[in-house]
Amino acid sequence: MQAALIGSFISAMATVLGAVPLLFVKTLSEKWKDILIAFTAGIMVSTSTFGLMPQALEEGGIIPLTIGLLLGIVVLDRIEKNIPHIDVENEPRIRSFDSSSLLVIIALFIHNIPEGLSTGFSYASQNAGLGPMVAISIGAQNMPEGLILAVFLISTRVSKFKAFMIVLLTGLMELVSAVVGFFAANYIQFLIGYGLAFAAGAMMFIVYKELIPESHGHGYERPSTYSFIAGLLIMVYISYAFA
């Protein structure tokens, strides 16, 4: 339980860590943003393919793997389709914090719930190394997400302090859902296989729907591709370290 709390906390607080660069730089070049996003995509694909899916198959079998994977994709698809997506580049003239800004924050709260559940389910798995591996993967995805949210909030004339507090609260929502997922899986053992597959599906959806298109849309496809492979390989090495 202690390891699950620590890992979930670090993963959730990576959202805040991602916003820290705004204290030192005003902008991040498109090239480096694409490289970082592609690196995150590689980490998440590696975690899903070599960590979550094999463990889900081992603990639940082919049916829970299939159902959980599809459920993770469908849930993330519904979330993405029914809540607004932050696009800082196409909203440069935002002048004040309004109801649409509040809707974006609520959307991120909801978006963080399945991510937290993924971490909680992974720590409840029989594979002791899977929890840290998933926490690292989710944390890597949270960092650019935290940066984008902070940029968006500051563009609406929210102070840097308030922006960081809002980013912190979205991270805490992920921590709460991780704890819920951990306890649910421990008390209802058959959920673990479904939960791990759900996490894999959610990650794969994020990668192919958001991260890869975002990292290949500004003319830096080649360095982004190498960055993707680097992220994938680094996560493979980490998985061996926790094996």
Image (cartoon, helix red, strand yellow):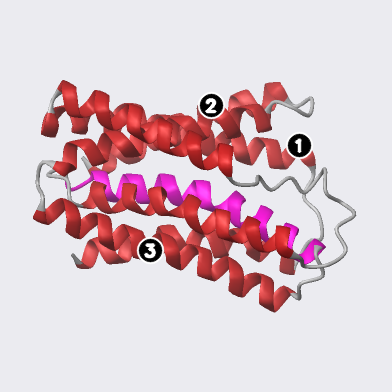
Specify whether 224 is left or right of 106: right
Point out the image quarter for the N terminus: bottom left
Q: Locate residue 127, reporting x and y percent.
A: 16, 43
Label whose residue precedes the other's in the sequence (1 or 3)? 1
Q: Please give the label number shown on residue 31.
A: 1
Q: Locate residue 39, reporting x and y percent.
A: 56, 36
CA separation in Å, label 3 and label 2? 25 Å
Q: Foreground residue, 202 or 141?
A: 202
Q: Amino acid at mark 3?
A: Leu
Q: Give the SS element for disc 2.
A: helix
Q: Amino acid at mark 1?
A: Lys
Instruction: Please report the residue visible at 17 percent of the width from the left and 23 percent of the height from the top.
Output: 63
Instruction: Please report the residue visible at 57 percent of the width from the left and 60 percent of the height from the top.
Output: 106
Query: Would residue 143 be counted in the magenta stretch?
Result: yes
Whether residue 236 appears in this view of the structure is: no
Q: Main secondary structure of the magenta part?
A: helix
Res 150 quadrant in image: bottom right
Residue hosting label 2: 208
CB within 8 Å, label 1 to label 3: no
Point out the image quarter for the C terminus: top left
Instruction: Please report the residue visible at 65 percent of the width from the left and 46 percent of the height from the top.
Output: 84
Q: Locate residue 53, reporting x and y percent.
A: 27, 29
Q: Give the SS element for disc 3.
A: helix
Magenta span of residues: 128-155
Mark 1 surroundings: few (<14), some (14-19) or many (≥20) residues within 10 A:
some
CA separation in Å, label 2 and label 1? 19 Å
Residue hosting label 3: 175
CB within 8 Å, label 2 to label 1: no
Q: Give the SS element for disc 1.
A: helix
